[in-house]
Structures are given as structure tokens and as C-alpha cells.
Image: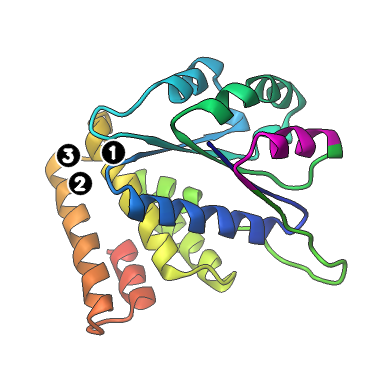
Amino acid sequence: MIYFYYGTDIEKARQKSLELIQSLLKRKPDASLFKIDSEHFDVNIIKEYIEGQGLFSEKYIVFFDKICEKKETKEIFLDLIKEISESKNIFVIFEGKLDKVTSNKIEKKSEKFINFQLLEKEKKSEYNAFALADAFANKNKKESWILYRKAIDAGEAPEALHGMIFWKVKSMILESRNSLWKKEELNSVLKELIDIYHESRRGESELETRLESFILL
């Protein structure tokens, strides 16, 4: 199943992609989330995601981040689009501006698609919530904080950023291959993220400020 968001309004297309992923993860809390971009494009891994299912979950949720940026990956990707659409797993495709032929091919195989167009007078900066999650995974506090502030300043919801970090930590626990983190550390971090979320829901703290403090500690 494919959900496809693209267009010249890159910020909005990315935001809606992340919001969809958040919604899907809430509905399928045991699903495994994976991200693939043009720099880490691997046909064999994509075919595994098409055909496989997680050890502890019923489905994979796979986020394709600007796969069509490079001509060589775009051509291979389009050859796989029929198989991707027929998979039992869920694929969220995010792209910027695309040529009509490419967008039409993906649209025809998508469960849902939206083309976000940026008005000529609008100027918007792009941020990457997944980069924040990766920086946090690499224990880079300074980079994590900079990316967090950029995302917040660009209008991203703290809930979405909290979710990206949460699911990154959960993925690292399941993979058990991260040499930077001990499993006890990851479990402690996951518990704190859960506590932060519930505190904000109860009105005991503001999520934006609480999450920023957590990133810096």
C-alpha cells in the first residue's frame, strides 16, 4: 500500500508525510518503521520490505525520503512501484518537485496522493525530523538541539519530533546492534520519553520545553 506526498511545497509535503507516519504508528504500535533515501538505496533491502514482515509486528512502515532525487535510483524505484503497491506493508513516499511522467506512475499505484504546490511568493525553509532522530541516536547533543530548534522554528509540532525520537529509540532496542548505547540506557531513555509524553498530556509540563531539556541532558 502506498501513500504519496510530493510537490514544490517541500515543507508541507514532508510535514504531512510525518503526520501520516505518526498516525499509522498510533494505530499500529507494534509496527516497525524504516527509512530509505537516495543515499542508502538498496534494491535487495526494498524487496525484503515488500515481501517481509517484522519479527514482533504484523507490518512494516517504510518511509521513502526523496528516492527520485537521483536518476539512477528513480528508474529502479519506478520499476518496483507495482510490487510496492501490492505489498501488505505500508509505504509512505515523500518527494519534492517531480516531472509529470514520474508523478503519474506513482500516483496510479497509490492508495492516496497529494501534490503540494508552493505559491511563488512564499519562501519556506526545509528541515528533516529524521535527521534529528539520527543525531540523537549518534549521541550528538549539539546537532540534536540545533535540528530540534530548526524544526520547531519551522512550525513542526513537538509531538511529531517526540514521536520520531521515540520510534528511533524503540528501533534501536529491537535491532540491538548500536555500539554507542547499552540496552539499559535505551530502556531508560524510552521510559523517560514515555514519562515526558504523559506529563505533557496531564498538563504538568510543556512538551516543547520538556523535550528540549531532555535532548540537552
Residue sticking out furthest to the left: 184
Determine if the magenta segment contains residue 106.
yes
Residue type at the position of mark 1: Met
Residue 189 x %, y %: 21, 54
Classify 174 as above or below 79.
below
Residue type at the position of mark 3: Lys
Closer to the eye: label 3 or 2: 2
Q: Is residue 168 visible?
A: yes
Looking at the rendering, which quadrant does residue 194 occupy? bottom left
Give the residue at x 71% y 27%: 74
Residue 99 x %, y %: 84, 39
Label 1, on which residue? Answer: 172
Label 2, on which residue? Answer: 186
Which structural element holds mark 1?
helix
What's the magenta bit mostly, secondary-structure-wise?
Answer: helix
Residue sticking out furthest to the bottom: 203
Give the residue at x 44% y 20%: 51
Residue 146 x %, y %: 49, 62
Residue type at the position of mark 2: Leu
* Residue 182 disc label: 3
Residue extent of the magenta highlight:
101-112
Circles 3 and 2: CB distance less than 8 Å?
Answer: yes
Category of crowding for the residue at label 2, using alpha-carbon neighbours closer than 10 angstroms: few (below 14), some (14–19), many (at least 20): some
Mark 1 vs 2, N-terminal side: 1
